[in-house]
Amino acid sequence: MEISAKTRLLTVIGDPVAHSLSPAMHNAAFRALGIDAVYLALRVPAESLPAVLAAQAAIGGAGNVTVPHKEAVEQSVARKTDVCARVGACNTFWTEDGGLVGDNTDVYGVTAALDKIGGTHKGERWLVVGTGGSARATAVAAAERGATIFVRSRDAARAKAFAAWANGLGVVTRVANGPVEVDVAINATPLGLAGHDPLPVDVNHVPGAQRALDLVYAPGETRWVHALRERGIQAADGREMLVQQGAAAFERFFPDTTAPREVMRAAVQRALRA
């Protein structure tokens, strides 16, 4: 990839962000389509976020947002899409008329990843582990699929607040403090990024689960995915969600171009094998 004075810069901002495969995925797409652009990861501490967002707007920037900034960015953009406002979290942004526009492609990503391991059905029970931006996107996906939610968090107050918020969306949501019988289990926390992390939820605490999605991705897949499969549960890590939300974001950045999903998926698979 040759960088010139005309090369467009896109970024993913987060803290931590060194684990992100978004640069590998998007740069592979640019190469495949001959797009003069480069995609970088920027570690942005919380105290630096306002300055970084102001700079993005000033230079006509675009890109993605990962943990822990999705909710803060949603509150900071000049304009937001309906789905971004509904989720209350932003994972995709670009510049229009000198201001940042926020969107959320995680909802699409979660839905597409779940479909990959078996279509969801109205009336299913989902366990959502976590209360952050990814969990919020999962709740909106649940609303679209007519599912009910059990939310689990190490912070009881956050779990209660999340349940109240999700109920406000029209999703029947309860707090889960122990084992709960569900159809689908979803890890929407960062647990699993580090090899020594505890499992997001004990496999014994999801009796009846038929499918599970870990929004974290890792080489060889996550420990939680392996533990679930040992119990006969169809499970996948977050690589397909990454590809699907990334492809949707790509088409926001380049509205007249179809994202090369197979190229992006192959880039993620290569990076996870490296």
Image (tube, rainbow, N blue to C red):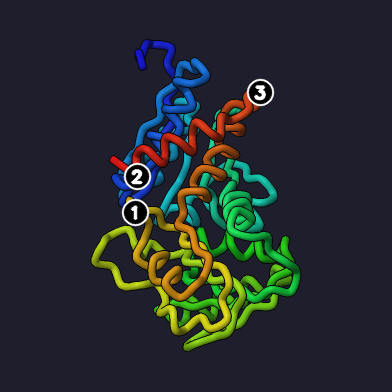
Residue 140 x/y as whole percent? 65, 61
Indicate the quadrant containing the C terminus: top left, top right, bottom left or bottom right. Answer: top left
Say which of 232 and 7 sits in front.
232
Q: Return the mark for residue 272.
A: 2
Point out residue 91 in the picture as x, y percentages from the top left corner.
51, 47
Residue depicted at x 34% and y 63%: 192
Q: Earlier in the sequence, mark 3 or mark 2?
A: 3
* Disc 1: which residue: 220
Camera-nearest label, 3 or 1: 1
Query: Can you give x and y, in whole percent of width and height, for residue 55 in the image?
Result: 41, 33
Q: Nearer the viewer, mark 3 or mark 2?
A: 2
- Residues packed near mark 1 inside 10 Å, few (<14), some (14 to 19) or many (20 plus): few
Task: Left or right? Give the position of 138 relative to 223.
Answer: right
Circle 2 Cα neighbour tier, 10 Å, few/some/many (<14 / 14–19 / ≥20): some
Residue in front for this viewpoint, 203 or 95:
203
Question: Which residue: 49% across, 34% down?
Answer: 264
Q: Between marks 2 and 1, how big is the CA–CA gap?
A: 7 Å
Q: Secondary structure at mark 2?
A: helix
Of callouts 3 and 1, the N-terminal one: 1
- Up-down: is 15 above or below 62? below
Label 1: element kind: loop
Q: Secondary structure at mark 3?
A: loop
Q: Position of residue 127 (x, y in %)?
A: 55, 74
Q: Which residue is mark 3?
A: 256
Give the residue displayed 29% in from the left and 45% down from the top: 18
- Report the disc number at residue 93: none
Figure check: 250 above or below 88: above
Whether residue 9 is visible, yes or no, is: yes
In front: 65, or 51?
65
* Amino acid tagged 3: Asp
